[in-house]
Amino acid sequence: MRVRPIGHRPVRLPTLIYADSVGVQFDVVESYIWLDSGRPLAMFSERIRHGLAELRIKEAAHELGAAIALAAMKETYASVGGMLASHRREEMAPPGKLWRPDWTGTLTAKGRVNILRNLDKEPFPS
């Protein structure tokens, strides 16, 4: 299999890592590499992950307000990816510093790969 962009949409790294892990063979025909990369959303992600875990425990214990807080936390986490690529056409100002559609694509790919990994697990108990 040769990896090529679909239309104008490149294949993201999480997708390639997943494909390799399930035995798909491919040749990368073109790539972009940033030597000065980092994990700018790592702290945000860790805080959200910790908060979700805590709220799930509280929700399981039927603590008052935990379900509402959990839903709000999930909505916040889900909306961040969209905010990184949003730019309102009616605004004539250039996008802000957080305008990173490349990050949005990677976050979306990671989410899709997580769904595939969950489907790869043993069947759900009945």
Image (cartoon, rainbow, N blue to C red):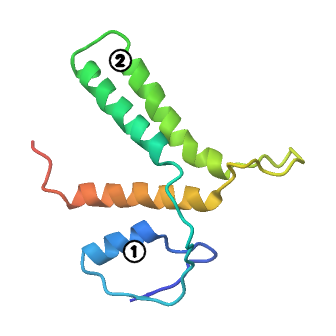
Question: Mark 1 is on which residue type?
Answer: Leu
Pick out the residue farthest to the front.
36
CA distance separating discs 2 and 1: 37 Å
Q: Is residue 86 above or below residue 19?
A: above
- Badge 1 marks a residue whose secondary structure is helix
Q: Is residue 62 left or right of residue 48?
A: left
Q: Which class describes the residues within 10 Å of circle 2: few (<14), some (14-19), or many (20+)?
A: some
Does the CB distance between marks 2 and 1 fall below 8 Å? no
Q: Position of residue 94 (x, y in %)?
A: 84, 51
Quarter of the picture holding the C terminus: top left
Name the image quarter holding residue 112.
Answer: bottom left
Q: Residues within 10 Å of mark 1 (few under 14, many from 20)?
A: some
Q: Which residue is mark 2?
A: 66
- Picture quadrant of residue 24: bottom left
Query: Of the residues shown, which amino acid type is indicated by label 2?
Result: Ala
What residue is at 35 percent from the left and 34 percent from the top?
Answer: 50
Q: Which residue is mark 1?
A: 16
The residue positioned 36% from the left and 61% from the top of the image is: 113
Q: In the current view of this chain or complex, which residue is farthest to the right?
A: 92
Going from N to C along the chain, the mark reached first, 2 or 1, is: 1
Q: Nearer the viewer, residue 57 or 98?
A: 98
Depth check: give the residue in front, 98 or 124: 98
Quadrant containing the N terminus in the rendered view? bottom left
Counting labels gives: 2
Residue at 78% over, 46% down: 88
